[in-house]
Image: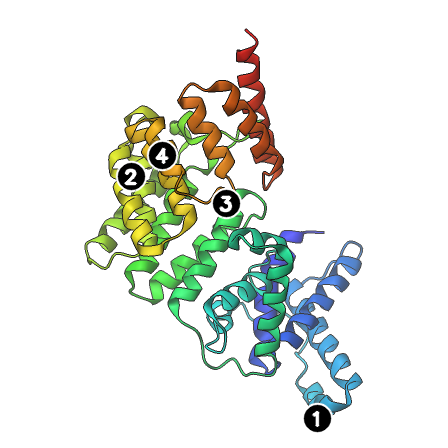
């Protein structure tokens, strides 16, 4: 069973149902039923046209549910519009769905959460982690969003800023390795950049390209994480870096700075350094200051502390870290790194072990555990 294929087809099938007038919640339920049926049937009887098969089954599941509900009996006349057998139209509805889910009746945070769940294919746990909230809180937020849009016609698409936020979070989840959606996020952002002349759209595309260019060097052959400073820069995709820098420069020239342009500028400075030692950390700190002014995001302040530690020394980094909420994810890992650079190896080892226990994924946990073991071994010498 090709789960990647199923995931990639879901937005398009969902788009067909929504365009036929089905409210979002009912359409999503029908598509989920069709996916379950595909998992059962396809291993022994794979369809020649997977999208057409899913569309037909999802439509039938919706009609079955409609007939069972007396209040929706008026929809039974839609049975005559059941899609004809055969290949479905090769239309990509994903980007349109991103806009439709950013419905004006929803708050931006609810619109992003709903889109990530229904179109982006992320789990509630992954979305909660991206938003730094408990999983139960995010589940309630998504449920409220579904109730809000249930029964509405999706004819009032939302704004670009919300769509950019969704694409950014989808890319981040794909880039982490939990869900391989990074390339899909880049593809959709390219579509958006071609359709909309907006400096922040360009900034997001540049940011994605610059980060994605480093992806081959982020893991060792055994799957373990390789920190940026230790990566083999010859494995970076220079073509993507050049494209990202060119797009960023054009966006910055318009003098309409936004958070994605600022993040891309930081990524470009890392990509421009021939070695880790030659990184222009002073400029990176300046860009983090701009980013903090634009977003007031606690994660930005956490990353800024690392940059300050590299530019002005670990003591300065620890002083910057003291102004950050210590409950923030990865706070302890950053504290461990700065204390190690400051020469306090026993404390750094304890903090690495503590950070490993709270790591959001297996690869990061293993990396932090190895860091703690390395420092403990040094302490025994």
Q: Position of residue 294 (x, y in %)?
A: 31, 55
For the residues labelled 4 and 3, the Cα–Cα distance comes to 16 Å
Residue at x 50%, y 33% (from the top left corner):
333
Residue 217 in view here: no
For the residues labelled 2 and 1, the Cα–Cα distance comes to 61 Å
Q: Nearer the viewer, mark 1 or mark 3?
A: 3
Q: Are marks 4 and 1 in contact (CB under 8 Å)?
A: no
Q: Nearer the viewer, mark 4 or mark 1?
A: 4
Q: Which mark is residue 284?
A: 2
Q: Are marks 3 and 2 in contact (CB under 8 Å)?
A: no
Q: Which mark is residue 319?
A: 4
Mark 3 nearby-residue class (10 Å; few <14, some 14–19, many ≥20): few
Q: Quadrant of residue 50?
A: bottom right
Q: Is residue 255 left or right of residue 193?
A: left
Q: Considering the image in quadrants, where does the C terminus appear?
A: top right
Foreground pick, 378 / 222: 378
Colour scheme of the picture: rainbow
User: Of the residues under marks 4 and 3, which one precedes in the sequence?
Assistant: 4
The residue labelled by disc 1 is 74
Residue at x 42%, y 37% (from the top left corner):
214
Q: Is residue 158 left or right of residue 195?
A: right
The residue labelled by disc 3 is 328
Q: Nearer the viewer, mark 3 or mark 2?
A: 3
Foreground pick, 371 / 171: 371
């Amino acid at each position: 069973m090709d789960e990647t294929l199923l995931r990639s087809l879901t937005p398009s099938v969902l788009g067909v149902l929504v365009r036929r007038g089905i409210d979002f919640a009912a359409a999503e339920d029908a598509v989920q039923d069709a996916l379950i049926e595909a998992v059962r049937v396809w291993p022994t009887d794979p369809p020649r046209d997977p999208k057409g098969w899913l569309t037909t089954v999802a439509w039938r599941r919706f009609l079955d549910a409609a007939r069972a509900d007396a209040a929706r009996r008026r929809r039974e006349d839609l049975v005559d519009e059941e899609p004809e057998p055969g290949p479905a139209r090769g239309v990509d509805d994903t980007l349109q769905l991103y806009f439709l889910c950013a419905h004006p009746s929803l708050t931006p945070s609810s619109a992003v959460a709903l889109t990530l769940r229904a179109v982006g294919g992320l789990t509630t746990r992954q979305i909660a982690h991206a938003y730094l909230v408990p999983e139960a809180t995010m589940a309630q937020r998504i449920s409220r969003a579904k109730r809000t849009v249930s029964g509405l016609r999706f004819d009032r698409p939302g704004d670009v800023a919300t769509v950019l936020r969704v694409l950014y979070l989808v890319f981040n989840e794909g880039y982490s390795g939990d869900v391989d959606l990074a390339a899909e996020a880049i593809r959709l952002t390219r579509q958006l950049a071609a359709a909309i002349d907006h400096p922040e759209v360009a900034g997001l595309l540049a940011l994605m390209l610059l980060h994605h260019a480093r992806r081959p060097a982020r893991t060792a052959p055994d799957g373990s994480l390789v920190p940026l400073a230790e990566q083999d820069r010859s494995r970076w995709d220079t073509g993507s870096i050049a494209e990202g820098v060119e797009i960023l420069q054009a966006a910055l020239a318009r003098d309409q700075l936004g958070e994605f342009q600022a993040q891309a500028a930081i990524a470009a400075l890392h990509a421009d350094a021939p070695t880790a030692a030659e990184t222009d950390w002073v400029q990176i700190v300046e860009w983090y200051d701009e980013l903090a002014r634009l977003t007031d995001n606690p994660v930005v302040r956490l990353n800024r502390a690392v940059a300050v530690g590299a530019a002005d020394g670990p003591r300065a980094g620890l002083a910057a870290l003291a102004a950050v909420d210590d409950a923030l994810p990865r706070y302890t890992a950053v504290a461990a790194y700065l204390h190690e650079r400051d020469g306090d190896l026993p404390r750094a080892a304890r903090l690495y072990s503590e950070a490993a226990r709270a790591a959001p994924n297996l690869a990061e946990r293993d990396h932090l555990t190895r860091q703690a073991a390395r420092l403990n071994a040094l302490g025994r010498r």
